[in-house]
Amino acid sequence: FSTGNQPLVATLVWTDVPAEEPEPALNDRTPMLVNDLDLRITRVADGEVFYPWKLDPDNPAAPATTGDNLADNVEKIQLQFPDAGEYIVEVSHKGEIIDPVNPINKRQSFSLVISGVAERTIDLALTNANVLVSGCDFGENTPAFVEIENKGQQDVTDVVVYFEVKDSNNNLV
């Protein structure tokens, strides 16, 4: 939730797995991300989607624009003058996650920092979430571990959490 009185900023950072070494080339602009995570902010009121900053590799002196960042393992969205209201911050990925450490339960750790969120009496933050099955055996009774922390000023009990598991094409699984 944003009051609209301060910028709303979200920054996503991850340590990508090593890519295959490319053939030597001068100024090769081929994206090297293996696990390309994506950050988006959606304003609930009208569904407008905001994208991260990105540079144009063919014109590096040009000012940054916003759009799908295919090159960097740091993505930042900054709404300098957000409308007051609810926003959804989403982290997703393209293609298959490559995890050389755990090839069955594939994971890509990341950090997400959000500032400009209005303080409310109850302000819950998702601090950890993992589906507790391997492979693709997902269903409505799939066990999951979800850790939520109350960052607000009021005690809260009996919180009900709903979650969805989606594949790389954003389909429910």
Image (cartoon, grey):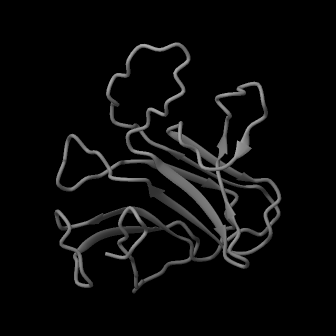
- Residue at (35% x, 66% y) in the render: 167
- Is residue 6 rendered to the left or right of residue 20? right
Q: Position of residue 100 (x, y in %)?
A: 22, 40
Q: Is residue 54 above or below residue 25?
A: below
Residue 28 at x, y percent in the picture: 52, 21
- Residues 96 and 58: in front is 58
Placement of the C terminus among the 4 image quadrants:
bottom left
x and y percent of residue 121 in the render? 62, 76
Q: Quadrant of residue 99?
A: top left
Which residue is located at x 80 percent, y 69 percent?
Answer: 83
Count of numbered labels shown in the rendering: 0
Q: Quadrant of the N terminus?
A: bottom right
Residue at image position (74%, 43%) is 65
Q: Is residue 44 left or right of residue 25?
A: right
Picture quadrant where residue 5 is located:
bottom right
- In the figure, is residue 47 to the left or right of 39? right
The one of 111 and 62 positioned closer to us in this rendering:
62
Q: Residue at x 53, y 37 (%)?
A: 72
- Find residue 19 and report its image quarter: top left
Above or below: residue 52 compared with residue 161:
above
Report x, y in % for residue 131.
26, 67
